Amino acid sequence: MRTLRSIVGLVLLLATVIVQAPAASADVAVRAVAADVHLFYYPWYGSPSVHGSYRHWPQGGHTPPDDVGADFYPTLGAYDSGDTAVIDRHMRMIQQSGAGTIVTSWWGQGSYEDGVTPALLVSAARHGIKVAWHLEPYAGRTAESTVADIEYINSKYGGSPAFYRAAAWGNRGAFYVFESLRITDWTALEQVKSSSIVLAQTTDPSRVAHFGGMYTYDGIAGATAPGWRNASDFCKANGLVWAPSVAPGYIDDRAVPGNTTPTVGRDNGAMYDRQWSNALNPATGGTPSWVSVTSFNEWHEGSIIEPARSNPPAGHGYLTYQGAYGRTGADAETAYLDRTRHWVSQFTGGSIPPANPNLALGKQITASSNQGGYPAGNANDGNQSSYWESTNHSFPQSITLDLGAPAEVSKLVLAVPASWGARTQTITVHGGDTTVVPSRGYAFDPATHNTVTITFPATTQRLFRLNFTGNTGWPAGQVAELQAFRIQ
């Protein structure tokens, strides 16, 4: 359970000056994001290469790097939250999700998480992401110490352009107080109301005196939304923020062995959709001011939308996102980022463009030959049942995608009809006059929807040519879908 999280009191001795970060710079692609969608973010992980030892990953008695305290395994491995390269990768992932604000877990002045904050703010500013604050129940926390913490954060970090300020709420910062019900008297919050919106974790209107709003965090309750509509009505009537929390699922079996907390299955994405629907349906969720997502990377609880490996280290019983929203293989790893963007668009009325559009859809496509009735155009018509097939018994053959203009591409997804039997096709990928991926065999397997994903370092090209020299299932090149993407 979240209340059982390890809160090792390791301190990073970093500079204590006010953080000043550059605005989003030209070297970083800043994508459209929604500041009113907030992702709970955890900067508490450590690794030997940066921190000097593993931190948080060993929870539950595990031994990183392959064996971690989580039921899913990160695509980035057992990473370090202080690694600036990791932080940058996270910011690009968050851009892809469409959410514009992270709510960073913060465990007190001088804590490990406080020490990571300066680098987090710098990267967030460069990527157009805002940072709000999740005030955690460190030992000895009181209402008065919480006020002191808010004043400290405002003073130390308020100068960063990444510091979240709610434009519709007087440009005040946002502070979520986890397990706020542990304290009964919050009168001290009156001291910071003019500068800060402080949210209580509850749906009980009788427990929010002196607070500026309510949130739920609970990734289990979101499936049924108990009390959400009443909480929303109360907030609306009293000028408070309502920020219900939605989650893709919950499982903490590896991080907390023997824990009896119920698990919440992802149901290939259906659970995430249900919780978002509950939040946005006026009958169940009322009218949210913000939507908070539990979580970007709370790996211990299995509530993450951060990409998880489709081929995690063997022998540990890890789960994967296989099948989420019909996606398989490496393509499934970002399924929850992309689905978040879909729901962000629903929440914002469609103002967020789709993430990672298929650059190949509808573009010109030609082939060296085709068997009668199976033309090249079938390979990018959006229909996996129709397909291109080259002249039989005549390798090599090729199919060429023309994007119409140079575009950055770092992933191709190929498919043959889902009903076909397994086959391996030998393919070389060319970008313009350059060999992007040397010849190798790609296994199309009906167990993975007959889809393969080819990733490579990003390259900017107009033309992509696939050269076929073998096919164990039929003596020809065959493609039902050829998709091209830029990985964030």
Image (tube, grey):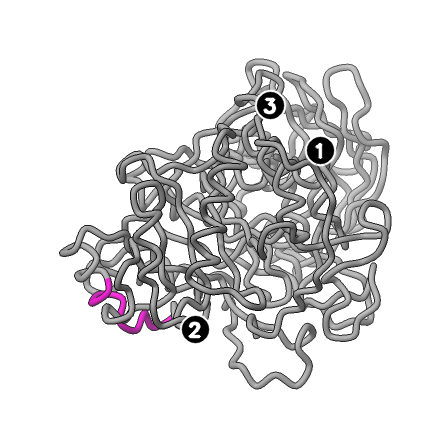
Span colored in magenta: 223-231
Quadrant of the rendering where the C terminus is positioned: top right
Q: Residue at (76%, 29%) from the top-left corner? A: 429
Mark 1: few, some, or many residues within 10 Å (few <14, many ≥20)? Answer: some
Identify which residue, 172 or 323, lies in the foreground. Answer: 172
- The x, y position of residue 297, in whole percent, is 60, 55
Q: Earlier in the sequence, mark 2 or mark 1?
A: 2
Q: Residue at (57%, 31%) from the top-left corner? A: 18
Instruction: Choose top left, top right, bottom left or bottom right for residue 144.
Output: bottom left
Amino acid type at mark 2: Arg
Q: Earlier in the sequence, mark 3 or mark 1?
A: 3
- The x, y position of residue 423, in whole percent, is 75, 52
Give the foreground label among 3 and 1.
Answer: 3
Give the foreground label among 2 and 1.
Answer: 2
Amino acid type at mark 3: Val
Instruction: Tell me the CA gap for discs 2 and 1.
Output: 72 Å
Q: Residue at (31%, 47%) from the top-left corner? A: 193
Identify which residue, 393 or 63, lies in the foreground. Answer: 63
Query: What residue sits right under mark 2 in the picture?
Result: 182
Query: What residue sits right under mark 3 in the picture?
Result: 28
Query: What residue sits right under mark 1 in the picture?
Result: 391
Q: Which element type, helix, strand or loop, lies under badge 2?
A: helix
Residue 362's tag is none
Q: Residue at (58%, 72%) from the top-left corner? A: 251
Identify which residue, 66 or 153, lies in the foreground. Answer: 153
